Image (cartoon, rainbow, N blue to C red):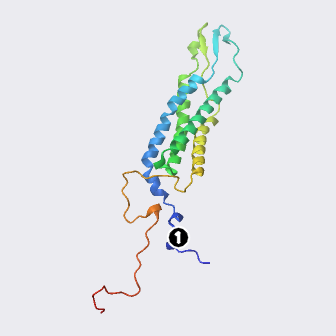
Amino acid sequence: MRPPSPAARPASAYWRGWEEVRADLRSSARIVLVLALAGLPTGLAWWWLAPRAEFRVTGTGPVAVGNPSDELLVADDVVFALLLAGVGLLAGAAAWFLQRRRGVATLLALAVGTCLTGVVAWQVGQLLGAGPTEAQLADVGALVTTGLDLGSPAPLALAPFTAVLAYVVAVLAAPGDDLGRTEPDDAAPVRGALPGGAEPLPEERPLVDVPPAGRPPS
């Protein structure tokens, strides 16, 4: 059986995603920037919510105040992971509601932007929750607080994972291949374009030239 000729193939058989990606570059850059800035409040929330322990500096060294949990350092990572997972889900859902920009470029921007969210949040949290200095540890009688640190870099992958997961689930639930993407209201229609992106058929010519009415044939 002979394969169908290019003219006989439907328009949907060809991927025209590069034009869509180029059209979405500016909005994708904005998504990356917004998600990177979202790392600031995320890092602030990590510093505020993560459990920390207090120590009293004595002549023999720091002594814990109260009974701090043995899972204190692990709890810092857990709080950070939960925050990034929540931010990723919110970012994926918010990106899907950008109906005019649904596509490959938005998905890539979502992954890159949420990676930056985790890195920025990590650095902000460590900056705000810095541990005691040598001078503070040498001050007998001073009250110091443990520093905020990430024990493992694994939680940094949660934000892009959950963001992409939320977006892909919405893509799979979309009723059409166009993902419900809409064109801007001020977009000028392309001359000769047909609905659905189909290409106009070439004009057919008759096999025999028929003279117009009222003109004798030559």
In the image, residue 10 above or below residue 171: below
Which residue is drawn at the image coordinates 46% and 55% (left, top)?
A: 20
Which residue is drawn at the image coordinates 49% and 57% (left, top)?
A: 17
Q: Left or right: 199 with respect to 151?
A: left
Camera-side residue: 168 or 198?
Answer: 198
Camera-side residue: 93 or 136?
Answer: 93
Residue positioned most to the front:
214
In the image, residue 85 above or below residue 2: above
For residue 49, what is the image quadrant? top right
Q: Looking at the figure, which quarter contains the C terminus?
A: bottom left
Image coordinates for residue 5, horizontal then vertical, percent: 53, 74
Count up the numbered dots: 1
Q: Left or right: 66 with respect to 112?
A: right
Which residue is drawn at the image coordinates 61% and 38% (left, top)?
A: 158
Image coordinates for residue 145, horizontal then vertical, percent: 60, 16
Which residue is drawn at the image coordinates 59% and 32% (left, top)?
A: 83
Q: Left or right: 148 with respect to 18?
A: right
For residue 130, what is the image quadrant? top right
Mark 1 surroundings within 10 Å by alpha-carbon count, few (fewer than 14), some (14 through 19), many (20 or more): few
In the image, residue 22 above or below residue 9: above
Camera-side residue: 54 or 211?
Answer: 211
For residue 56, what is the image quadrant? top right
Q: Looking at the figure, which quarter contains the N terminus?
A: bottom right
Image coordinates for residue 190, horizontal then vertical, percent: 38, 61
Query: In what element is the residue under mark 1?
Result: loop
Q: Identity of the amino acid at label 1?
A: Arg
Residue holding disc 1 = 9
